[in-house]
Image (cartoon, rainbow, N blue to C red):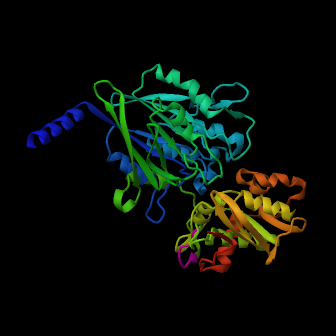
Amino acid sequence: MKKLSLLIAVLFVAVGLFAKTTTIYHTSDTHGFYYPRNGEGGFAALANVLKHGQQPYLLLDSGDFSNGTVEAKRSKGIKSAQIMNKAGYNATTIGNHEFDFKDAGVEPILKALNFPVLAANFLDTKSNQYPPNVKPYKIFDVDGVKVAVIGLANATPTNATKKYKFKNPIKTLRKILPEVEAQHPNIVAVIVHDSLQDDKHGTKPYVEEIAKKFGGRVHLVFGGHAHKIIQNETINGVLFTESGCHTDNVSKVTVVTDDATGKFVSASSELIALTVAKVGIDKEVAAYADSLKESGMDEVFGVASEDITMDPVVAGHIDGPLNDWIADLGRAYTGTQIFAHNNGGTRVDIKQGPITKRDTVDMHPFENKIVRMTVNGKFLKFLVKKSLLPRSLYTYSGMTITYRNHKGKVKDLQIFVDGKPVQDKELYTLGTNDYIAFGGSEGWPFKRIKDSEKQQVGTGNVRSILEDGIRAQSPLKPIATGRIIEYK
């Protein structure tokens, strides 16, 4: 028995002698969150993890870095590029929010990055060529291991584009892989701004198809967009990794290759929470981040007596207290019977304690104006039914909903306005933000309503309404939920 144990130990040592490990770090959807919030996250913490980890390494990102905080918004994404340069990223791809500043804002962001933007399916419409600093892929040498990284851009930009076009990601990958393979990489990775499990956007993405069609040729897929955390999910031999959002975490992927043949052996991932007290900060990066701060954003103008979360807090209640509160503010502002607030527009919770302007920009970084319109009950039923599953896309003020989830389908749907069941032919006044009203993202049902029937209300935007609400109602407390109830 002792001889057998010794033999097994020797075999393990032998395997180890012929194996080489390569480290790849990954982030996504950083959205301009340069600084820690409540002791969590930020680029200085990320940099310290990298500094004290295995050297050398690759640092990759899956896009949506350009907008989401006041620094990112006011610089039109340039400060985000600058801090990513400082952190030492090797590559990123293009997310939908890289278009927040419209076509005119895209090229300055691309040019500001000191590392390549990998997006094989992203072309200039006129030239049919890749835009400046955009490449389909790049092969990196990481301590003698050749790592090919192919990028695929998200094809649903936040603002419609005429200057750029997107090709089918799977067809593009099929076309580009032979060119990559001809250079004999040891590891093939794909960075995408799409998710393996996208219930946030109510879409079925193509990401899993990468494993089904290219397993054995592609080894790693790094995703994003849905703000999910996915670790050690392997499909058809392909490791899928997603790292959450807002620079709260970084994924560390360890890849084993055969030292003799150079062939891929295995890969595993580990999520590292960027808790400042645990991982520390890089002082140089922290000082650089501080130099990017916009003035006047940290003045306190309200207080929350406890945490107010956008997520549901009661079993069976699909609505969360923060989104309910925002919807109520919107309805009061518009004077409509109903206000529809898109949950995806709320980016972070309100934390217990002082509230600053920075907090409100972090919560809603967009410049959405407020719109009202008149719709019939048939439209309301269509809107609600299409937006409940697999994840509720809206919260409503002035309207309550009950339903059953039967095998992923909405059953026994009941909708009430002012305590009365919605009637198909009855007319109702409805408010929402202009991005949703004119059909952006999950607002596609509103394309059924003529644009000429949508009227802007006042000059305020969602964020100014939030700030007025905080001033008027401080100290804030969570309000009761139960506007959308799912029965078993």
Seen at 82% across and 51% down, the residue is 447
Q: Is residue 388 visible?
A: no
Measured as percent of width and height from the top left, residue 468 is found at 69, 73
Quadrant where the image shows the N terminus: top left
Image label count = 0
Screen quadrant of the C terminus: bottom right
User: Which residue is outermost to the left?
Assistant: 2
Depth check: give the residue in front, 244 or 292: 244
Residue occupying image coordinates x 75% and y 56% = 436
Observer able to see residue 91: yes
Q: Position of residue 467 (x, y in %)?
A: 67, 70
User: In the image, is 9 to the left or to the right of 462?
Assistant: left
Decide which of 388, 176 is in the foreground and name it.
388
Residue at figure coordinates x 19%, y 36% from the top left: 13
User: Image height check: is 195 above or below 306?
Assistant: above
**Residue at (60% x, 29% y) in the render:** 172
Question: Is residue 453 rendered magenta in the image?
Answer: no
- Relative to 441, is 153 on the left or the right? left
Image quarter of residue 124: top right
Determine if the magenta segment contains residue 307: yes
Q: Position of residue 256 (x, y in %)?
A: 33, 36
Question: Which residue ends up furthest to the top in the rendered image?
Answer: 182
Name the main secondary structure of what is drawn in magenta: loop
Q: Above or below — where is 346 with respect to 185?
A: below
Which region of the structure is painted magenta?
303-309
Give the percent coordinates (x, y) of residue 143.
Answer: 33, 31
Tell me if 323 is positioned left or right of 453 in this view: left
